[in-house]
Image (spheres, helix red, strand yellow):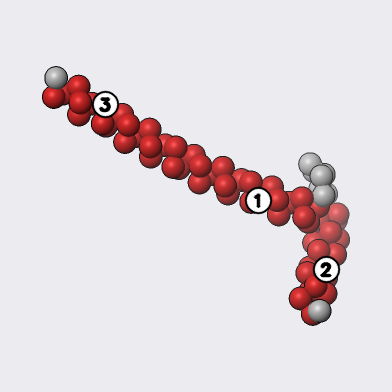
Amino acid sequence: MEHDIINTLQVALVLAFCIFIGYGAFLIVMDKEREWKKRYGSKWFVSRADKIRLDAEYEKKVRDSKAR
């Protein structure tokens, strides 16, 4: 009986830890996706030349908004 309670608590603790780590990973991925969409729009693939151009445009837009 006591062994079952300990086993259940261990499973609950591991499950809580996995949910915590999974939620953190989800938040990181969502933040990266938001940043990607701000910089590159809804494009899935960006060539190196487009990336450089779009990054420069984004940085200029950020600088201009901070200067105001």
Q: Which of the two discs, 3 and 2, sits closer to the camera?
A: 3
Taking the image as shown, residue 29 lies to the left or right of residue 45, namely: left
Q: Which residue is denoted by mark 3 in the rendering? A: 8
Q: Which mark is drawn over residue 14? A: none
Q: Which residue is denoted by mark 1 in the rendering? A: 32
- Residue 54's x, y, as percent? 84, 59
Which of pointers 3 and 2 lies earlier in the amino acid sequence?
A: 3
Which of pointers 3 and 1 lies earlier in the amino acid sequence?
A: 3
**Callout 3 secondary element:** helix
The alpha-carbon separation of the residues under discs 3 and 1 comes to 36 Å
Taking the image as shown, residue 36 lies to the left or right of residue 4, namely: right
For the C terminus, the image quarter is bottom right
The disc labelled 3 sits on which kind of residue? Answer: Thr
Q: In the rendered structure, are the residues bearing label 3 and label 1 in contact, judged by CB atoms less than 8 Å apart?
A: no
Q: In the rendered structure, are the residues bearing label 3 and label 2 in contact, judged by CB atoms less than 8 Å apart?
A: no
Residue 56 visible somewhere in the drawing:
no
Q: Which of the two discs, 3 and 1, sits closer to the camera?
A: 3
The disc labelled 2 sits on which kind of residue? Answer: Lys
Write the residue at 58% across / 49% down.
28
**Above or below, 11 relative to 16:** above
Q: Within 10 Å of the Cα at label 3, are there few (<14), some (14-19), or many (20+) other Cα atoms?
A: few
